[in-house]
Amino acid sequence: MRRSSLLIATLVGCCLTPVASLAAPSQNAFQREMIQRIAKATGSKVEASGDDWQQLNVDRGGPDKNMFINVGRIWSYCQNASAKECDEAKARFVRALTETPPPARREDLRLIVRDQVYVDYVRSVATADKPYAAAIRQIGDDLYAILAVDSPETTAIANPETLTKLGLSVAEAWDIADRQTRAKLPPLPAPDALLKQPTAFADYDYLGSLLTQRDVFEKIAAVVGPDLFVTVVSDRFVFVAALPDGLALEGFADTVRKDCAQQERCISPHIYRLRDGQWRIAEKGGR
């Protein structure tokens, strides 16, 4: 998976090397290819869903079995990736659709962080027998903590059926997931250290979940002040620093947006500040 090279380069002040041999498929060509790939892998009828070219319907033999998927983010990633990287991303995406995750265990519960686009998609495919409302909690303008089940190949949202099988209430599952997720993550920086230099987290799993630790960030912000900000371009890169509003922040926001476009699974292209326990988009005046 591509690391956040743009942000790292910005931090160390070095020059970037352009990505060679960009794949840059058109939307129509990409949609046709993904329909063919998914149909071949699943043995199902696959077609565009409605007016949104990103949405595909996988007909698996009945309304309660059909699956709606969104290929927009893979296409966006391919606009900035090499042909080889793009092909690998498409293969991983299709492979994930065909793999059946192992039975959920309590020790596999995690909290993940995703944006509004992801949550809107999840809600659009929810059914009466698979509601996801209890598994989603808003933590910012467009950021959500989601109760999930981790496995070696996939991460699945924990629905009520999952929790019933585990013998857990929603509150119990959230507490367990929170503890287990924090135990897997690096510690957040001490306020004094953050005042001296920014902190970049990379190459862990679920780094985006650091943003669920709003209680810890509140303590950091009490020392660092209102200029504290974070970025969360992917689950493999989170950046924490202090910078006031102004031209420098606006320039860095542009870097974050560009870096998000290079991620196979970007979480967010925004800069956030913590205000009243919620992550507010700094570009929207989140002071």
Image (spheres, rainbow, N blue to C red):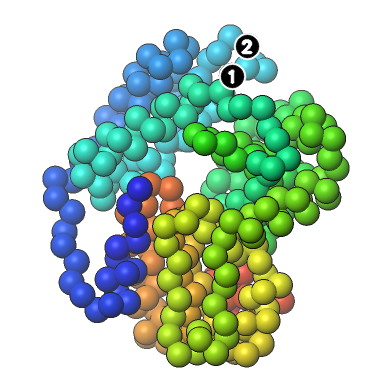
Q: CA distance from mark 2 to mark 1?
A: 6 Å
Tell me which corner region of the image, top left, top right, bottom left or bottom right, holds residue 148.
top right
Quadrant location of residue 281?
A: bottom right
Amino acid carrying mark 2 in the image: Gly
262 shown above or below 225: above
Residue sitting at x 19%, y 66%: 16
How far from the left and from the top, in percent, is residue 45?
46, 12
The front one of 106 and 14 is 106
Classify residue 196 as left or right of residue 287: left
Label 2 neighbourhood size at 10 Å, few (<14), some (14-19), many (20+)? few
What residue do we see at 55% from left, 46% from top? Answer: 118
**Left or right of residue 39: residue 221:** right
Note whether 156 is above or below 268 in the view shown. Answer: above
Q: Nearer the viewer, residue 177 or 94?
A: 177
Where residue 134 sits: x, y (%)? 77, 44
Quarter of the image with the C terminus is bottom right
Q: Pointer 2: what residue?
A: 62
Residue under the point 70% across and 35% down: 105
For mark 2, give the secondary structure: loop
Mark 2 vs 1: CB contact within 8 A: yes
On screen, residue 214 versus residue 71, left or right, reads right
What residue do we see at 54% from left, 77% from top? 189
Residue that mark 1 sits on:
66
Q: Secondary structure at mark 1?
A: loop
Q: Is residue 123 in view?
A: no
Where is residue 268? Give x, y as percent: 48, 59
Up-down: is 133 above or below 186?
Answer: above
Question: Can see residue 135?
Answer: yes
Is 210 above or below relative to 64? below
Q: Position of residue 210 (x, y in %)?
A: 58, 63
